[in-house]
Every structure is written in C-alpha cells, then in structure tokens.
Amino acid sequence: MELLHLSEKETKEALVNGKITICVVGLGRIGLPTACMFAAAGARVIGVDINEEIVHEVNSGKCRFQDEPGMEELLRKAIAQKKFNASCDTSSCVAISDVIILCVPTPVNESKVPYFQPILESCVHIGKSLKKGTLIVVESTVSPGTVENKIVPLIEKTSGMKATEDFGVASCPERASPGETLNHLKSVPRIVGGIDSDSTKVAAAIYSSALGVKIIKVADPKTANAVKLTENIFRDVNIALMNEFAILYEKLGIDVIEVINTCSTKWNFVPHYPGPGVGGPCLPANAYYIIDEGLKVGYIPLLIRMAREINDRMPDHVVTLVTEALNCAGKVVSKSRITLLGVSYKAGVHDLQMTPLQRVFQALKIMGASVAIYDPMFKGEEVFGATVARNLNEALSMSDCIIIGTADKEFKNMNLNKVAQICNKPTALVDTCNIITPEDAKKHGFFYQGVGRRIVRHS
Amino acid sequence: MELLHLSEKETKEALVNGKITICVVGLGRIGLPTACMFAAAGARVIGVDINEEIVHEVNSGKCRFQDEPGMEELLRKAIAQKKFNASCDTSSCVAISDVIILCVPTPVNESKVPYFQPILESCVHIGKSLKKGTLIVVESTVSPGTVENKIVPLIEKTSGMKATEDFGVASCPERASPGETLNHLKSVPRIVGGIDSDSTKVAAAIYSSALGVKIIKVADPKTANAVKLTENIFRDVNIALMNEFAILYEKLGIDVIEVINTCSTKWNFVPHYPGPGVGGPCLPANAYYIIDEGLKVGYIPLLIRMAREINDRMPDHVVTLVTEALNCAGKVVSKSRITLLGVSYKAGVHDLQMTPLQRVFQALKIMGASVAIYDPMFKGEEVFGATVARNLNEALSMSDCIIIGTADKEFKNMNLNKVAQICNKPTALVDTCNIITPEDAKKHGFFYQGVGRRIVRHS
C-alpha cells in the first residue's frame, strides 16, 4: 500500500478496515491512550517502549495511569481484541509499520536545557529499519524547527532514504491535560503540519478518523510546534502574572482572589490563579524550548523568561508564608511538625514531574522541620524520600502547621473543626491554592497565610 | 436628605424622583457620558470642568466625542430637559450636590510617573465647599491606596470634616472602552468599594439605578482600583507576550497570526494580537501605577515592567520593518515618500493619546523620509505637526511605502489593485495590524513586511 499517495478518504477507509499498521513509540501518558484509540478505531497497533516493565504491564492489560478515567478499560479491550500489543524491539516493529507515532518524552535537563536525546535516539532506530512509504508523526513537544532541522536529516542519514520522496513526516502535537487525557484526545482539535502536502494529508486523515476531532492543517511542522508552545506559554505567563500580583497585593493588603474573581466580570478578562508554582511535564519545560531557539537567533524572549523565573520562585514564597504563619503562632520552623497536604503537581493526578511542592518540602526539611506528607493519590508510597501517610488524620496528628499544596477534593471537603482538634494548637495554616478562606481559617483558630491573601490580623 | 443613611431602595427612588443632585467633575470621554446617563435616569446633574471651551460646548449641546455613537443625542436631550448643565465653578456646584463623581484624567508624566496632581487639586476644591452628608465617588483610575491614603486625608483636611462620619467616599472605576463608552456604561458590571458600608451601599444604589448594570461590591477602594488595574494590565501583558512571539517568530520563519488563530482552538487559550505598540489613556499608563506602588513597598513587578517595555519598543520594530521592506524594493528611507495610514491609538476613535504611531512618524522623519498621513478620523486636521490628507488617494499618491497603522475599516476595504497603481513602484507595504495577508500583498506586487509575519521572499 502506498499510504502517502492515498486520498484522505482512502486513508480513512484503510485505517477503519485494519489495513494500516501503526507503531507508537513511547507508552507514557500520551502514547498509551493514543495507541489504544487508534486500535479502537480499527488500526493494527504496536506499542514500543524501552522500559521492559511497561511493555510487560501493557501486554497484560494493566494500566499504570489509574488517574485517567476509562483508560484501563480501553487498554484491556484493545489487548483482548488483539488489535494492540507492546514490544521493546523498535526496529522490527518499525519495519512492518505504515505509520510511526513518536510519543517520547522531551524534558529539560537540570540546567533547563531541552533534552531531546531520547527522541533523537528513537529516530536513529526508526531510520535503520524504516520501510519506504512510511509516515512518521511527531506528537512529542519539540522546539520549532527540530523536526525540519534535526529529525528529518537524522532519519534521512540513518535510512539512506529521502524525505518527501521515500517517507513522510508531520508534527501533530498532543494537546491533552493529564487526568483528562482520553476526554481531551476525543474532543480537542488537532494541529497537523507536515513537511509536504502528502504528509499533512495522511496525518490529518488518520487523526481525524481515529479521534473524531477537528483537524487544523498548518504550514509546516515548526508552525505546529509553535502553536503547542504558544498555548502552553500563554498559561505559564498568565499564571506568573497572577503570582506577581499575589505577592504585591499581599504587601498592599489586597486579596488577589477577590480581585481576580471581580476582574472576571469584564468581557475581555480571563482568570488565572496564583499558586505554589507550576509543575508537570509541559509548562515548566516548554518556555525553555522557545528561549533556546531565541538564544540561537539572538532574541531571548525576556517576558517568557521572567514569567518562568517568577513561577519557579513561588515555592520560596510558600516557605516564607509558612515561616510567617508559624511566627504568628509563636513557633519556629526548626521545632515544628509540618504537614504538607498534596504533593502532585496537579490535584487528582498521580504525577510528581517538576512538582513545586518538592521544593517546599526540601526547603522546610533543610530548615529543620519535621514534615509529614499526605496526598490521596500517593497513600503509603515513598515520595521525596518520605512515606506518605495513609490518611488525613495520621498526617495531621499533632501538626503545628498545615500547608495546602493542591486543591484536592479531600482537602476542599475537610471539616476544619475536626482538623483543628487533631492538630497541635496554636496551629498555622498556609493555603497555596485558595481552597480555605482567611475568614474560615480564622474562625477555627488557625494562624492563616495564603498566597495572595490579605493578611488576617489576630487580635 | 441624609443620603448616606438611606437604604438602597430609598436611594434609588430618590435618584429617579430627581431628589439627588450629582456633580460630575471632569467632562471628558468618561465624565460627559456618565453625567448624561445620570441625568437620563432622573438625577439633577451639574458637570464641572476647568476648560471653559468644554463647558460652553456642553451647554450648547455640542459633543466633541463624535466617535461615541448616541452620545450627542443623549447630551442634547439632557440639556433640553434641563436635567444637566455645565460650569467652571467647582466650589459652588459642590456646595449644592449630594454626590460628587470624579472623572478627572490620571495620566503618567513623561518619565512614566503617575501624575495625580489634577485629581488631588479637584479634591482641594471639593473639600473647601463640601456639605455634610455628601458621597464622593472616584471613577478615575488611581493606584490602590490613593483613595485611602491621599484623597480621604486631603478632603478631611480641607473640609475640616471627618470621613465616614461627615461624608462618604467610594471607588467605582470606569470600565468602558473608547468608541463604545455608552454601550459599555450600560452593560459592563461596575465594581464598588467604599471606605465604609454606607459609602458602598449608596454608590452601589445610584450606579445600579442609573446604568442598570450589575454591581459587584468589594472590600474597599483599593481593591476596586486593583481590579481596574489588574484587568488592564492583563491585556497589556498579553499583547506584550504576542509582540514578543511576533518578533521571535519573524526570525524563525513562522507566521504568528497563523499560530495565534490556531492556538484559539484550545479551550483555555484566549487570543491577543501583536501590533505597532499599545496606546490610549489607560493601558500604557496603568502598569506604572502598580509599578509605583511596588517601588514603595520594595517589590517591583518585573513581569509587568517588562511587558510595558516590550510594547513601548514596538514602534522601533515597525521602523525596522519599514527599512527592510524599502530595502527589498531597492529604496532608502531618506529618499522615500512614506504614507502612514492610521494615527489614532485605536481604529475608529479620534484619539491620539499615547498613540504608538507618533513614534513611528517621528523616527521616520528623523531618518529623512517624507511622511504623509491619512486617517478617516482626522481628515484635514493637524496631527504630529503635519496636515492629514483629505482622502486615501491624496495620501497614497507616488508613495514608496505604505504603513498600515490601524485596522480602520477603510484600510481593510482598500482595493489593492488600485492602491498599487497610485503608488510609486516598486512599493513597500508594512502591515502592523494584520489586515493584509503576505500572499495578497505579494500578488499585487508589494514588497511586504508585517509584524510577526513570515517574510515573503520575492523571486
């Protein structure tokens, strides 16, 4: 089958009729659901991962993303119907595939430099066993130009074939939010930018067919990647703006939450909220891909750089609030038992990637505090070198200071009366994510501080 | 009538029944329509301005804001019904008023320091003839804390009376957009924050009654002012972010407009667009009020500062694009006739306040260009020391370079075929506000550059 020469309609029919074999490289939070969705649509799908444990799990129908609703069911169905299986052997899988979808992580290293080695290594493997007429789709978020200037030349070199003539390449960046991945895969429009019109056409057809979402075709892979980065950086910058307002308004005695909620009554304002910092695999990394490109062409995007810096410093601000709240309660950090409620980078997901709460935890440990952790997603697990409490009561027992780190439902529903009784009075309470009002905290006798909240004077 | 002791319902009835006299100080783009709206609702309104010409105009039913639909009609009606008249004599008007509404401009000076002298001088006049029981409402945008720390003490000092006991004060910042003022006055919710609950209550009642809009009561005047600044700075920062992306993407060969429009298909992205800079009475000034407060408390909001800087430098970027476009056409700035289409800070309004296009004009003049101006809002007027052309053809005649400075309808509807014939070929075209596509410009033979647009190579 000359896949790249099929029309959109023919491509869709071939996919639905099981005539297309798809190899998904990287079986993480995006790769696994994507593979399962393509299998459910009718394609023959092989998942590849370098981690043997993951491959074994997948083949036995076990899903490690229990925080993704519907995911395990979808996986089991695909396995049972023999539409999907996993393997560690990239080369042999690539050799029999019509489409290769790259879902390899693209993080930044400790110095915040984009670390694209894993995806480039995958490309070397792919190039070595690539068959003629294959379409390679890059879902991983990369800097604009990475596909054109790095991935394509690398595959041409290792395969000895010529892009556009012998194989196609398109970018189709994932746009899903962890914890809602399946829902977003099925509802959020996808951006497709190929190196030529055939690549764009076929990539558009298979995504449209398998996911049932709207497809927006853009000029080229770098534009598709610029879209992905721009929308994420928009969020990062707006959160940073609200973090900046939060700290300033604390000093001016203004409640930033009241301000943001009131601003939202204007037709052209869109609310973002301050917090303990920004975590996850995307937002804290994506800005650096753009900064890196800026460095190369002599134009560092200073606003984006500054926003990143502001968000990265929020954990320090949380520590300051903890110190202040404990001070009001007449206690010092070094002699306090502190309870951190929530460690994930986002409520409701089991994910510690670049979570700002790790910095809060570490800073308080260094200052000599005893820090207990509780997070319903991590009960009894080892996190930051400590064991997560089995329940809220255990974590709060004799606590001198509670830190609300994530807006988890369980924390939102806490009975503050009971909490106050379990803790060691006088108790400090620091809310980083706006789930307890200063008034409510005061009413229950807590010495309260909140990110961006007007300080409550205790008489 | 003890206005401040009336209930909300009683206040509304008193207003509708003509029992409340309102003095609006400052008859500009906000003060005049506000005065007319209160008159239309039934109040007895006196408008005060230090400019005798304005007072004379208003009393003769002439409106200088011809760009505000419905404004002149509303003014004439209020004058004809003897519900409204204007005066230069603040003291005698204040002496007979129950409510005083301050709509005095609050600009920044050349060094971008907030210049609140005019509003503070008004307060001195008000204090000297204030009667007991009066409510003073501040509509002017001021820094958070200005009402509490400057306006209230000043009025107390000059009146010898005590705030909350003898008079009330509330902030109710205007939230209207020039060119749409009346529409926004009647539709956008208003934020009211008083120095005590009586001030908030009465201010809320009169605005709710006169404008028919939703009222949001906030903690105090500084919170109300923080809301106004936060929503405007949100816009300023997001435009700056897109300006930063625009310049970077030009260098990376990516079309920022394609990127922004595509990002808009994501549920949590809100489009803002790059341009020639940010003008008007609000956005270029408001950030400095917050920066000024930040300086006082030792926390300069660096992100907000950086955004302002980026927007302020956009005119320089436009000049760079002009130079590049002319260079492609084989021409130099110093020997070129350049036509600037649009000078207002916003399409469709007759307003040059802090317009970024003045900087573009001046920079090109300094470089030796001959610069013609056309803007349908300023036909035949003197602008930047030059006379605005009477029509498009006159402005474009023998032009070497067209700059689109505003997204005016007339420019959007231009017949590029005809335009190309009038100009001096080869002709450069620089679009700062995304109304002509690079492809369309190229098709008509222009050497095109656009803010954030992929450069079109001319073969």
Image (cartoon, coloured by chain):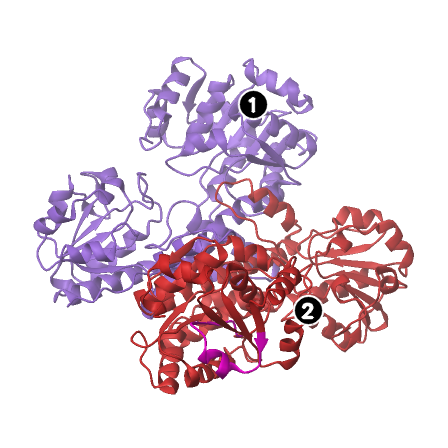
Chain colours: A red, B purple
Amino acid beneath label 2: Lys
Residue at x 63% of width, y 81% of height? A52
Determine whether label 2 and label 1 are within 8 Å by CB.
no
Residue A62 image label: 2
Check disc 2 and report its element: helix, strand or loop: loop
Residue at x 37% of width, y 49% of height? B279
Is B260 displayed left or right of B174 in the figure? left
Please identify, in this view, whether the residue under mark 2 or under mark 1 is nearer the observer. 2
User: What percent of the width, then of the height, locates residue B122?
Assistant: 50, 36
User: What percent of the width, then of the height, locates residue B163?
Assistant: 66, 34
Quick one: A164 or A429, which is closer to the camera? A164
Residue B177 image label: none
User: What percent of the width, then of the height, locates residue B235?
Assistant: 46, 50
Residue B209 image label: 1
Is A210 displayed left or right of B330 in the figure? right
Quick one: A119 or B31, which is closer to the camera? A119
- Separation of marks 2 and 1 at Cα, in angstroms: 63 Å
Is B235 displayed left or right of A201 in the figure? right
Chain letter behind tag 2: A
- Can residue A90 be found in the magenta stretch? yes
Check disc 1 and report its element: helix, strand or loop: helix
Quick one: A352 or B6, which is closer to the camera? A352
Is B2 displayed left or right of B284 in the figure? right
Residue A334 seen from this side: yes
- Can residue A441 be found in the magenta stretch? no
Position above or below: A361 against A240: below
Residue A244 seen from this side: no
Position above or below: A417 against A392: above
Q: Find the magenta span and give its range.
A: A86-104
